[in-house]
Amino acid sequence: MKLTLNGETLSLDLDPQMPLLWAIRDELNLTGTKFGCGMGLCGACTIHMNGAAIRSCITPLNAAEGQHLTTIEGISDGDELHPVQASWIKHSVPQCGYCQPGQIMSATALLASNPTPSDDDIETAMAGNICRCGTYSRIKRAIKDVADSTDSFQQANASLAYNAKN
């Protein structure tokens, strides 16, 4: 079975019903994606499939065939952190850190589809991710910070484009 993971096309000869999480962690040795509940309820195993946040613990490997998958290891650009990762550090989001890869993956999917989310949008998108340490307010601040920066960046680029034409 073929899939694209973090930009690399892979051929896997594994049980098609194996949870995607186990293929990622145990077979491909990408351990950033975490096992939490095994029922898709906590969000620790969140990855992207074609840009959408999914729970890899309940997604069978055959559902990923021909799809584009991204794990926490695939969102940065070399040594340059993704803006969400940088914001997580800036706002001291992690406490124990276990749930944070899933939290970051849900946040990046949200911001990719909605670069300027409202508080309600953030709460809805992040509702399926549980943080036992209770860092929800820091998570929300970090997402808002990226959204505000993204908005400013988009406005600056629009202004530059307008000025270049006139």
Image (cartoon, helix red, strand yellow):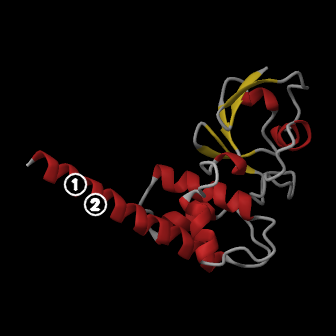
The N terminus is located in which quarter? top right
Residue 91 lies left or right of residue 112; in this view the side is right
Q: Residues within 10 Å of mark 2 (few under 14, many from 20)?
A: few
Residue 1 lies left or right of residue 68; in this view the side is right
16, 153: nearer the viewer: 153
Mark 2 in CB contact with mark 1 (< 8 angstroms): yes
In the picture, the disc for residue 127 is: none
Element type where label 1 sits in the image: helix
What is the residue that sits farthest to the left in this orientation?
Answer: 166
Residue 131: image x %, image y %?
75, 71
Element type where label 2 sits in the image: helix
Residue 32 lies left or right of residue 152; in this view the side is right
Residue 113 lies left or right of residue 53; in this view the side is left
Residue tagged 2? 156
**Residue 5 drawn above or below residue 155:** above
Evaluate whether residue 53 shows in this view.
yes
Q: Residues within 10 Å of mark 1 (few under 14, many from 20)?
A: few
Residue tagged 1? 160
Residue 28: image x %, image y %?
85, 37
Which amino acid type is shown beneath numbered disc 1? Leu
Among the 4 quarters of the image, the one containing residue 3: top right
Residue 163: image x %, image y %?
14, 53
- Measure the alpha-carbon separation of dots 2 and 1: 6 Å
At 48% across and 66% down in the image, what residue appears? 146
Which amino acid type is shown beneath numbered disc 2? Ala
